[in-house]
């Protein structure tokens, strides 16, 4: 990893008061209700990618995005990324990937913006205070599934372009967009598409920017690292059916009991991963890296309130940040086939599937981790001497990413933050995963940066996900300013 602290001196061209930026910002302020109305229309589409039955909604969302880009004068291709085989055995087409570009000038540098318009599942019964698919403003916050992850930021990028067009301000960059619909399920077929289009769509791209994350505190940030992820299903299957526990309880090996033993062997109550060898490759901590965590304005007390806990597994800010950004973690997400409705049911489920994931950090290697998980679970299951069958499958294998802080676009990002928020950017990493991030860097060799606009308390993936009106609107200004601050016609060096 590169840990160079960035200094972003204010340049004469980067004064917030200079007239193009002033006009751009004024237009954004004047049109904020219209921008929020458009976000409400996007949030209303239930584009959950975890359930292939809902891919029709994902495609609807991609078509709405395509239509908006065409209305703005961009050309759009909805690229085929193949098929997926479902657990039922059925083979279904994956939602396409949107590739778009605006008319360009070969003398200018080219920026490619990546985002996704699929969302994690959400139901009012999960405990939402409002309907998750009806964007609702309460006390300056816009609540709705996808408001921050990632419909709000994708829309903010389109609004930033719209603003240039509306005030007839020349855009100092060529712009391309790559928008997908299965990020929340591992980005099916996207790596292959990038490889296939490396010499065409990506050939003239200089910079790739991704706004699919949140700030670490109340301070605006530039993000230079993200964890990877491997997602696992461990299935235990035995009795031919679900059975009455009064009849069979005590005489059969219950799949759920086996599964609980398997899941309990993965991680302990302190968060320590128990799978042999999984943490062996984590890069050692250096003094200079440790120092980078000390200056982050992350407020532990504030974070406890956001999360609703008395304490974390770690007792200092630095340790909590390191746990989020530079150490792997293992989380257990759910059990399919288990009785999870309210009330009483005394059944022994005949087949259950446990779901868990491991967040990877440099220099972990997902295939290597997957092999160790397989070996470990096999060994634990053998020890149970159960007649049931166990199957472990890995659904996602996304690598961790570390960007290059010396790239030009971090300077443009820093200046843009100064223009909009009047402060230096915080240089942060991200605990969550954008599955395609490292592939972008590895396959295209281009400069990649994350430029988040989400707030630290936005609650991505959880109930009551939101983006604040402030972050959505100032974030739109940030993107407009970032475009403006980019080296006019400059290529990354
Ligand atoms: C691989 C995961 C499903 C990706 C997901 N990504 C994001 O939340 C990005 N905002 C994650 O859980 O990290």
Image: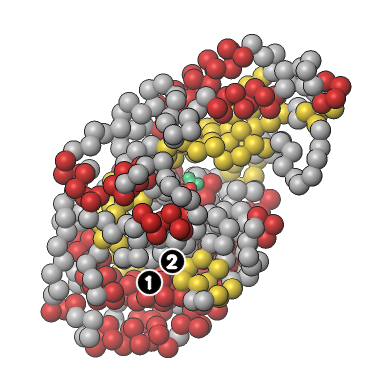
Which residue is label 1 attached to?
475
Residue 153: image tag = 2
Distance from the alpha carbon under mark 2 to that under mark 1: 8 Å
Figure quadrant of the C terminus: bottom left
Q: Are marks 2 and 1 in contact (CB under 8 Å)?
A: yes
- In the rendered image, the vertical position of residue 319 relative to residue 101, given as above or below: above
Whether residue 79 sits left or right of residue 369 in the image: it is right
Q: Where residue 381 sits in the image (x, y, percent)?
A: 59, 17
Q: Residue at x 67, y 24 (%)?
A: 257
Q: Residue at x 48, y 33 (%)?
A: 269
- In the rendered image, the vertical position of residue 417 relative to residue 88, given as above or below: below
Front residue of this view, candidates 224 and 335: 335
Q: Where residue 432 sits in the image (x, y, percent)?
A: 42, 48
Q: Residue at x 29, y 54 (%)?
A: 428
Q: Is residue 200 visible?
A: no
- In the rendered image, the vertical position of residue 430 relative to residue 482, given as above or below: above
Q: Is residue 306 visible?
A: yes
């Amino acid at each position: 990893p590169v840990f160079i602290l960035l200094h972003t001196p204010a340049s004469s061209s980067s004064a917030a008061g200079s007239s193009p930026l002033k006009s751009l910002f004024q237009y954004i302020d004047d049109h904020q209700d219209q921008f929020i109305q458009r976000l409400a229309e996007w949030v209303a589409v239930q584009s959950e990618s975890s359930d292939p039955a809902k891919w029709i909604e994902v495609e609807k969302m991609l078509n709405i995005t395509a239509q908006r880009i065409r209305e703005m004068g961009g050309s759009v291709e909805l690229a085929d990324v193949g098929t997926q085989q479902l657990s039922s055995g059925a083979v279904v087409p994956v939602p396409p990937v949107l590739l778009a570009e605006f008319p360009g000038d070969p003398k200018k540098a080219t920026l490619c913006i990546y985002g996704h318009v699929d969302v994690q599942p959400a139901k009012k019964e999960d405990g939402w205070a409002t309907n998750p698919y009806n964007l609702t403003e309460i006390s300056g916050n816009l609540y709705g599934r996808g408001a921050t992850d990632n419909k709000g930021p994708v829309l903010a990028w389109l609004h930033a372009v719209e603003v240039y067009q509306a005030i007839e301000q020349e855009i100092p960059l060529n712009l391309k967009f790559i928008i997908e619909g299965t990020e929340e399920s591992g980005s099916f077929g996207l790596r292959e598409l990038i490889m296939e289009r490396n010499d065409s769509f990506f050939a003239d791209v200089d910079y790739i920017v991704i706004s699919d994350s949140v700030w670490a505190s109340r301070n605006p940030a530039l993000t230079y690292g993200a964890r990877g992820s491997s997602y696992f299903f461990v299935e235990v299957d035995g009795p031919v059916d679900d059975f009455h526990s009064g009849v069979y309880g005590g005489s059969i090996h219950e799949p759920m009991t086996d599964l609980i033993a398997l899941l309990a062997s993965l991680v302990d109550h302190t968060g320590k991963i128990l799978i042999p060898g999984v943490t062996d490759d984590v890069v050692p901590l250096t003094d200079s890296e440790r120092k980078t965590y000390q200056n982050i304005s992350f407020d532990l007390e504030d974070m406890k309130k956001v999360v609703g806990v008395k304490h974390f597994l770690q007792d200092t800010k630095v340790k909590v940040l390191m746990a989020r950004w530079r150490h792997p973690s293992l989380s257990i997400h759910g059990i399919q086939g288990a009785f999870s409705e309210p009330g009483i049911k005394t059944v022994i489920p005949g087949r259950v599937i446990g779901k868990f994931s491991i967040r990877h950090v440099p220099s972990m290697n997902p295939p290597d981790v997957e092999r160790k998980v397989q070996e470990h679970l096999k060994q634990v299951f053998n020890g149970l001497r159960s007649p049931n069958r166990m199957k472990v499958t890995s659904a996602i294998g996304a690598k961790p990413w570390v960007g290059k802080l010396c790239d030009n676009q971090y300077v443009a990002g820093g200046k843009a933050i100064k223009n909009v928020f009047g402060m230096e950017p915080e240089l942060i990493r991200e605990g969550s995963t954008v599955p395609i991030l490292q592939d972008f860097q590895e396959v295209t060799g281009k400069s990649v940066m994350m430029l988040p606009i989400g707030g630290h308390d936005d609650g991505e993936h959880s109930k009551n996900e939101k983006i604040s009106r402030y972050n959505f609107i100032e974030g739109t200004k940030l993107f407009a300013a970032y475009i403006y601050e980019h080296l006019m016609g400059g290529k990354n060096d």
